[in-house]
Image: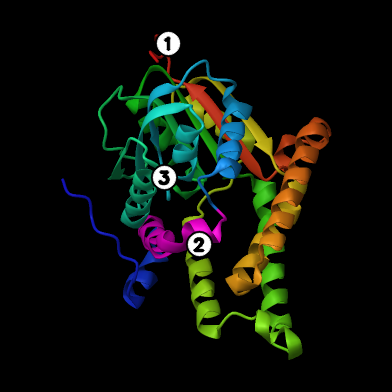
Amino acid sequence: MTDPAPNPHATAEQVQAAYQDPKLANVLYHDWEAGTYDEKWSISYDERCISYATDVFTAVAGEADQPYSTAMELGSGTGFFLLNLMQGGLIKKGSVTDLSPGMVQVALRNAENLGLDVDGRVADGENIPYEDNTFDLVVGHAVLHHIPDVRAAFGEVLRVLKPGGRFVFAGEPTKIGDFYARKLGQFTWWLTTNVTRFGPLTGWRRPQEELDESSRAAALEAVVDIHTFDPGELERMALGAGAVDVKAVTEEFAAALAGWPIRTFEAAVPQEKLTVRWRLFAYHLWLRLSALDKKLLAKVLPRGLFYNVMITGIKPGAPVEL
């Protein structure tokens, strides 16, 4: 079957229909965002994001003895997690999948530019178009909260894994973390877009047409973000699907409290105003606060307070052949 073509210019009728159809909303929203997604979220394929991806992976799954031969990313977006894990030496051959044709197209282009061995398919997380026992590893970053039936998705992940294969999902919002992140983001957007209406700060205001488009995208974003998770509840879902050695780990509390206002501010102002000095400041602040989270706050605060939850588990059976 031929995968559908991207649709980055949805009609008003399609957008209206998407409010009642989370899967359609995911396709439209992510096709809309595909071309600028890496820039919006400061995604790169250099040492900064390679280190982030490999650190996240090992934080929940432990050190890998050698590269996984085959891996699939579910809900790959532009390929951020898989491609950086491949560059970090954890994966040899990869497959990107996403419900959005636009995201698959960009992910494959990114892989080609990096010289990585990657194929791709448009895929529904509840019906993955690969045979049983295909992959040694399945990964995902910020994908489970977009899938209507997470339990069914875990079942599909286990189906396509080889016996003994591992899954690692990261970047999923916790219930408490999502609440304070959204409130911080909403307040920062309101403050920035209103303060820049006046006097010398008008140069920091994006054109109204761009702000309106961002607001429409944000409205769809509220539809595509279906779930938030309690770490224990997420573990029970994976165990219920048949996984073993399941473990959930949380991260980012102080880093999230600073990171969400910073990301929202960056989305609300013209990109040319964000100098290299600003980007370095924001990145190093995030690094320092992430270190504070890991070294201190994770030891004294309940894991449900942190913004991100990561989960890993294994398909029962013989050890994966690497």
Q: Is residue 82 above or below residue 263?
A: above
Per the rendering, the mark at residue 221 is 2
Q: Identify the amino acid type marked 1.
A: Pro
Q: Main secondary structure of the magenta part?
A: helix
Q: Magenta part of the protein: which range?
A: 22-42
Q: Residues within 10 Å of mark 1 (few under 14, many from 20)?
A: some
| Residue depicted at x 75% and y 53% | 257
Q: Which residue is mark 3?
A: 75
Residue 95 within the segment the image draws in magenta: no
Report whether 76 appears left or right of 3.
right
Where, quadrant-wise, is the C terminus in this rendering? Answer: top left
The percent position of residue 97, horizontal first and vertical second, equals 35, 43
Q: Quadrant of residue 42?
A: bottom right
Position of residue 183 in the picture relative to residue 218 (left or right)? right
> Would residue 233 be seen by someone viewing this image from the given angle?
no
Q: Nearer the viewer, residue 208 or 24?
A: 208
